Image (cartoon, rainbow, N blue to C red):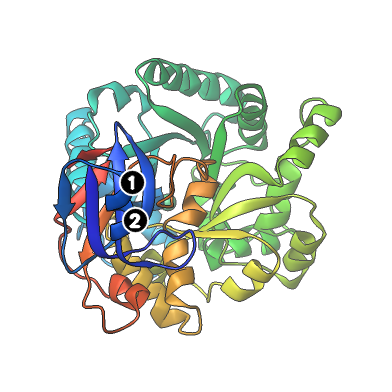
Amino acid sequence: MIIRARTVVTMDGSPIENGAIVVSEHRIVDVAKFDEIQARHTGEVIDLGAQALLPGLINAHCHLDYTCLRGKIPPQRSFTDWIRAINAEKAKLSPDDYVASINDGLAQATRFGTTTIANLTAFPELIPRIRAPIRLWWFAELIDIRAPKRAKELVDRANESLGTARLSGASTGLAPHALFTASKDLYRRCEEIARQQNALLTTHLAESREEMEMFHDASGPLYKFLKSIGRLMDDCGNTTPLKRFQDSIGRGGSPSRLRTIEVTRLYRPWIVTHLNELAESDFELLQRSESKFHIVHCPRSHIFFGHGSFRFERLRSLGFNICLGTDSLASNNDLSLFAEMRAFQKAFPSVSPEDILRMVTVNSAMALRQENTLGRLRRGLAADLLAVPCSGSTNVFEQIIGFEGSIRCVMVNGEFE
Ligand SMILES: [Zn+2]
């Protein structure tokens, strides 16, 4: 099948005017100017006309579990109050509600041209009940705040559920929720499994001022709330969330094996979400650290919570791979990555539209270790793509970011959705 469009935005060099791609089975087998494609291939031509064809968008951080909480939690006085509010909402939901919520979120994301989601789920046992129209990486979200002594058991049980899901083709990973809800033992067990199974890991880190206050000063609303529900607070005071994270990971297992992983892969298995609250000492730590992790910024969730400014330029200049995510609808209006790109652009007007689009294609593909499969329109990669109207007059990347509405043409793995 040949798909022709006014502009083919490959994310792999300059956009191709009057371009086309050839899709066979599930893969892209050629990308070039339309006349060159016609000279090399025969077969059905789908002419998309005045549209830009681009790689499917990749949401690097989402919780489809909470799609049904849209509009249920207004902005709160504090991050801690929001945690209380979401806990109260979650208590009302049944497994069937979660399945419906995940399916709703998937339908919505597909309409917005998202073809892959890094999705955190609190219920990995529900994965076999979901038939996703797009690609999902299921990260089992883990919290052991009430039973830190059972961290290993908790992780292993979740990993067993993920194993069952993997048997039917699911891609999976582990997600210690955050330093304030998951113990050091839980983080270490997840790292051990990641080393054994070459698995991906994700976590929330340094999201709010209250988290910084908790670890740095052993005080504040989050500290008080967690203490009141029985969390051991002996890891708080005179540290930062990032320092605690660095102390929690990477010590287990054989040092030589760990070294090999670091040398062969600059990026550790961690996809770290938020990283809003960083002290000057944290930047020194990041600069000194040999290996990097991937960072996900969620622009509209960031605005919802009124977090301090995200240090994009500084983190990027330190060599971190930065992606965008939507977070959940408990702190956002919808699952549109176009809206995330626009919110990011508003906050960082000096970043080029092409670099912004990179954060939901190339960069997020790399975070999921799919740089050889997803994120670009290139020969040999999976045929995940979408088309948006494009006038040909202004910058195509600017037009893509400005797109509002539903996407009519979305292809995942060579099939139109
Ligand atoms: Zn999140």
- Left or right, 309 with respect to 131, comes to right
- Left or right, 282 with respect to 206, comes to right
Residue located at (74% from left, 58% from top): 239
Image quarter where the N terminus lies is top left
- Left or right, 135 with respect to 263, comes to left
Image quarter where the C terminus lies is top left
Whether residue 119 appears in this view of the structure is yes
- Point out residue 41 in the picture as x, y percentages from the top left corner: 29, 43
Nearest the eye: 338 or 413? 413
Q: CA distance from mark 2 to mark 1?
A: 6 Å
- Image mark for residue 40: 1
Quadrant housing residue 120: top left
> Is 39 placed above or below 347 here?
above
Whether residue 110 appears in this view of the structure is no
- Point out residue 307 in the picture as x, y percentages from the top left corner: 48, 71
Q: Evaluate if marks 2 and 1 touch, with contact meaning CB atoms under 8 Å apart.
A: yes
- Point out residue 389 in the picture as x, y percentages from the top left corner: 19, 69
- Residue that badge 2 annotates: 36
Mark count:
2
